[in-house]
Amino acid sequence: MNDCKPCLRERQHPHPDATSQLVIISGRSGSGKSVALHVLEDLGYYCIDNLPVMFLPELISMAPERFPKLAVSIDIRNRPADSADLQDIYRKIQDNSRLDSVIIYIDAEDQVLIKRYLETRRLHPLSRQQLSLDEAIILETRLLSDIAALADLRIDTSSLSIHDLASQVTTLILGKPQKELVMVFESFGFKNGIAKDADFVFDARFLPNPFWEKELRSLTGLDAEVIGFFKRYPEVDHYVRQLDDLLMTWIESIEKSNRSYLTVAVGCTGGCHRSVYIAQSLFEAFRQRGFQAKIRHRALERKNI
């Protein structure tokens, strides 16, 4: 992602009286939560792993005086047994005018989690209940569904290296805006798998494809020749405008839901032409309107273009 913003301490807080930043990290076991906490620690956050959630309100009450930058992990080990307790804690966090908070949920595909456990030979926390590894992963998904639903941002680590995850968490934290939603636009190729961390996924595979013109095949949706190709087809512009209108219709409601990030993914077959052009067009349109916007082209990153 591009356009990193200044460090949080260099900007005002969303609440005028806020004096503390709180990042809650959650997700399934093996997804990369520990990596995220280590990144936050390097960014100056006081990090607490496996804190019993019953103590979180007390910790939050002292945070403005003692912990200006605080990060806490909530997962299967320390989640409250009653989801109502979690909802109550979440409301207290949202209502605390001295606290600027974000919840990041980190996850990966089931088969990826299984592979990671087999490679590290670690025991899943729920395996102590006489469950197989795949049964434990399925149960964990259900038990964490409440906090997953509260997350401001989801990160899918299925195809990310430790370095990639660390870089992404760093960029997201440093780019977290005040009083504004960060809109992340991504292009991807369906042949590489659907974007798992997206809030909206749009398909561009039905549009004219420059891949079939030999002189355009090696280019991307960022190149002038490919852009010119799309300008010849009114349906491409019509689709972009429809997606833009859809997002603009609901953006105010999304902002009011206290989300910090919205990820919009556009996919085509290979992720190099149609999806790149559309994602880039939407990114530029929202940036010109003054939104905090970021752009990422997943397939191009794979090819190091």
Image (cartoon, rainbow, N blue to C red):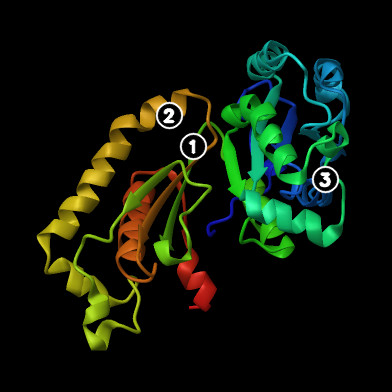
Give the residue type that dot 1 points to: Leu
- Position in image of residue 77 (x %, y %): 83, 31
Question: Does residue 175 appear in the picture of this structure?
Answer: no
Characterize the local packing of mark 2: few (<14), some (14-19) or many (20 or more) Cα atoms within 10 angstroms.
some
Task: Please give the name of the residue rendered at 27% of the width and 44% of the height, measured from the top-left corner.
Answer: 244
* Residue drawn 21% across the image and 48% down it: 241
Of residue 19 and residue 174, the one placed in the foreground of this image is 174
Residue that mark 2 sits on: 254
Cα distance between the residues tagged 1 and 3? 23 Å
Whether the residues at callouts 1 and 3 have beta carbons within 8 Å, the answer is: no
Above/below status of 92 relative to 218: above
- Disc number for residue 78: none
Q: Position of residue 138 (x, y in %)?
A: 66, 37
Labelled pair 3, 2 in contact (Cβ < 8 Å)? no
Q: Mark 3 sits on what residue?
A: 44
Q: CA distance from mark 1 to mark 2?
A: 9 Å
- Label 3, label 2: how far apart the Cα atoms are: 30 Å
| Residue 181 in view, yes or no | yes
Question: Counting residues from the N terminus, which is met first, the one under dot 3 or under dot 2?
Answer: 3
Q: Do the numbered discs 1 and 2 sit on residues whose CB atoms are within 8 Å?
A: yes
Residue 102 horizontal/vertical position (percent): 65, 33
